[in-house]
Image (spheres, rainbow, N blue to C red):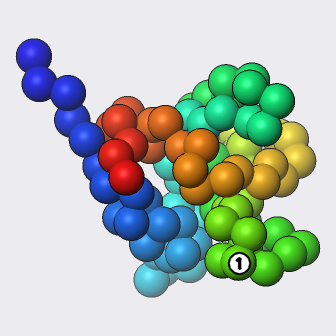
């Protein structure tokens, strides 16, 4: 059984493309570790902006959504070094 891996730079490119050409939000699953050590898994989420310089702080914003694409919680800042899994693929630097 081979573990499938995705490189972090490919994830960052996918997070920058927030919508499809038809204008629909791109939905993905993500697993990451918060600053306090808590492991978080969002089975359905979309990329959002943050009220900070995301590139300088190495952060990205994710928003959990339900099956209909409606927000079901608040925007969560994620440090790019804390990414563990993206769409079921293990993250590699």
Q: Position of residue 65 (x, y in %)?
A: 71, 44
Question: Residue drawn 62% across and 29% down?
Answer: 41
Question: Residue drawn 86% across and 75% down?
Answer: 52
Q: Position of residue 50 (x, y in %)?
A: 82, 69
Q: Nearer the viewer, residue 21 or 44?
A: 44
Residue 68 at least partly seen: no
Above or below, 42 relative to 93 = above
Residue located beneath label 1 in the image: 56
The picture quadrant where one finds residue 18 is: bottom right
Which SS class for mark 1?
A: helix
Question: Residue drawn 43% across and 72% down?
Answer: 13
Q: Nearer the viewer, residue 22 or 57?
A: 57
Residue 21 at least partly seen: yes
The picture quadrant where one finds residue 37 is: top right
Q: Position of residue 56 (x, y in %)?
A: 71, 78
Q: Position of residue 25 (x, y in %)?
A: 59, 65
Left or right for 29, reference 90: right
Badge 1 crowding class, 10 Å Cα cut-off, few under 14, some 14 to 19, many 20 or more, is few
- Seen as rendered, the residue at the extreme left is 1
Left or right for 10, reference 58: left
Left or right for 8, reference 18: left
Above or below, 53 relative to 67 = below
């Amino acid at each position: 059984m081979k573990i499938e891996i995705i490189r972090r730079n490919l994830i960052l490119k996918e997070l920058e493309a927030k919508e499809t050409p038809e204008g629909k939000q791109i939905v993905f699953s993500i697993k990451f570790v918060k600053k306090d050590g808590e492991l978080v898994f969002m089975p359905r989420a979309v990329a959002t902006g943050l009220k900070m310089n995301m590139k300088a702080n190495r952060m990205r914003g994710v928003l959990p959504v339900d099956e209909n694409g409606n927000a079901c919680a608040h925007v969560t800042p994620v440090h790019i070094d804390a990414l563990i899994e993206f769409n079921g693929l293990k993250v590699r630097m």
